[in-house]
Image (cartoon, rainbow, N blue to C red):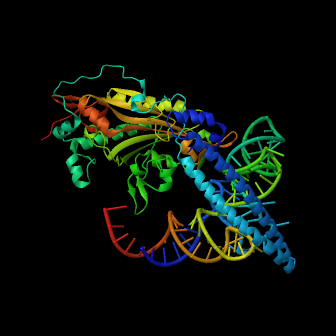
Amino acid sequence: MLLLQTLRDEKDRVLTGLAKRQVADAEATIDRIIALDDRRKATQTSNDEKLAERNTISRQVGELMKAGKREEGAALRDRVNEIKEGIAAGEAELNQIKEELEEALLTLPNVPHPLVPAGVTEDDNEVFRPFAGELPVLPDTAKPHWELAEEYKIFDLELGVKTTGAGFPVFTGQGARLARGLVNFFLDRNTAAGYTEFQPPLLVNEATARATGQLPDKEGQMYHCTQDDFYLIPTAEVPLTNLYRDVILDPEELPIKLTGYTPCFRREAGSYGAHVRGLNRVHQFDKVEVVQLAHPEKSYEILDEMVAHIGGLLDELGLPFRILRLCGGDLGFTSAMTFDFEVWSAAQKRWLEVSSVSCFETFQSNRLKLRYRGENGNELAHTLNGSALALPRIIAALLENNQTDEGITLPEVLHSYLGMTKLEKKQ
RNA sequence: GGAGGAAUGGCAGAGCGGUUUAAUGCACCGGUCUUGAAAACCGACGUGGUGAAAGCCACCGGGGGUUCGAAUCCCUCUUCCUCCGCCA
């Protein structure tokens, strides 16, 4: 959620930024928000005056009663009763204004950073760092990962359909081991880079989902347990970042670095077709996430650091990748700048997104009330997060790119995690 | 699921209807003293709204109510603790 103060003080900058996202009626919305806030201030001030009067008179009543002047006290009591009616009306109006204000504020997405390119669709994203080497070229007999998965018994989509439904792959045998090995590899590397590991809940309440911005923006994207009003997390970002909701940090504690492995659940309503075959898009998948809470002056430096860290993971896995900077139109609702990592899937001959790294500036911390003690009072911290990494498409690329007649070779860093150097065909 | 108890500032812990502008202690911060440190002493010491400021207002787990006046009384929800039941 954007700060009211920003809308007032930097309206031009906000409008320029939101134009990159093609936000409709941005100026009208901002004007309405400021008008509502003016009303809020006026209403609250007049109500506070009534409250102050009530408090003063009530104190006098107390003194009169103590002094035994019951009749004078009773007269003042009647006066307070009149004031109380005004207070009740004022409070009702105030609450209504606040509700409208909140609702309007929630409709505005984050303001893109000046370096974010304008654009409408993913085709307008900036190739921030192209892949430097030669893309691997496979023989015509090369198979896509969903065919390899059957030959090598990596995962089984039919079993997932039986137990749950489409989009819930069941990893089997050496496939399950590969997934577990990757999770451990990622967690070990993240921990070595100074991130503290957490195992958060996979179900979150509404307040948590709102604080990081999944609600109300992505209402239909999350699985909702209506009986208990919990949401299944679409990413570990949600519980991990919310660990620091309503917290005031000492500046020396920054940056705070968190990592965690969780399954992620996404409804992906309306997605179907050839481009979602195999592991390309599923409803449940494993992901290791990194989160940082940063001083505002350091956040973009830290974003660079996170990009470098994730690039290092992909280098170690030997996967060809490129980095995109998302354009305004493709940028997530809550993000100010996002880099996407895409690995080359040699059999499908296409780029697959495996990580998204974002700086949210104060958009999340405003809702989270995540602050640090600054020079001039408490100030909102910046939040950042990124996938390090999401498993399914990593597995897809590893299977496809490394297929040989003798089996699927594994990158050296995984040998000790899996206890083998390659995957073998199974009957 | 059942019975009882509890929830107050970073922590501990008073307060049970009206000088509470939330006592006191510890921690933290500034200062005096000291060669330096400790001790001692002095001072500052929660969050938010509004305002140029003084000030005013709200917040004692959340919500609602009683009252001229609520941290304090009532209702309700949540969480934690103790015990019972069930259970991986």
Q: Is residue A315 left or right of residue A101?
A: left
Q: Nearer the viewer, residue A179 or A246?
A: A246
Q: Is residue B65 left or right of residue A200?
A: right
Q: Nearer the viewer, residue A113 or A157?
A: A113
Q: Nearer the viewer, residue A108 or A416?
A: A108
Q: Is residue A364 left or right of residue A68?
A: left
Q: Is residue A253 visible?
A: no
Asked which quadrant contains residue A330, the reply is: top left
Q: Is residue A21 left or right of residue A72?
A: left
> Outermost residue, left direction?
A427
Asked which quadrant contains residue A51, the reply is: bottom right
Residue A151 drawn at (x, y percent): 16, 38
Task: Residue at 21% x, 54% y: name it.
Answer: A162
Residue A209 drawn at (x, y percent): 47, 51
Q: Is residue A130 visible?
A: yes
Residue A378 drawn at (x, y percent): 66, 44
Report the quarter where the N terminus of chain A lies. Answer: top right
Residue A211 drawn at (x, y percent): 52, 49
Q: Is residue B60 above or below residue A66?
A: above
Q: Nearer the viewer, residue A5 or A405?
A: A5
Q: Is residue B57 above or below residue A389?
A: below
Task: Residue at 65% x, 58% y: name it.
Answer: A94
Q: Is residue A426 above or below residue A233?
A: above
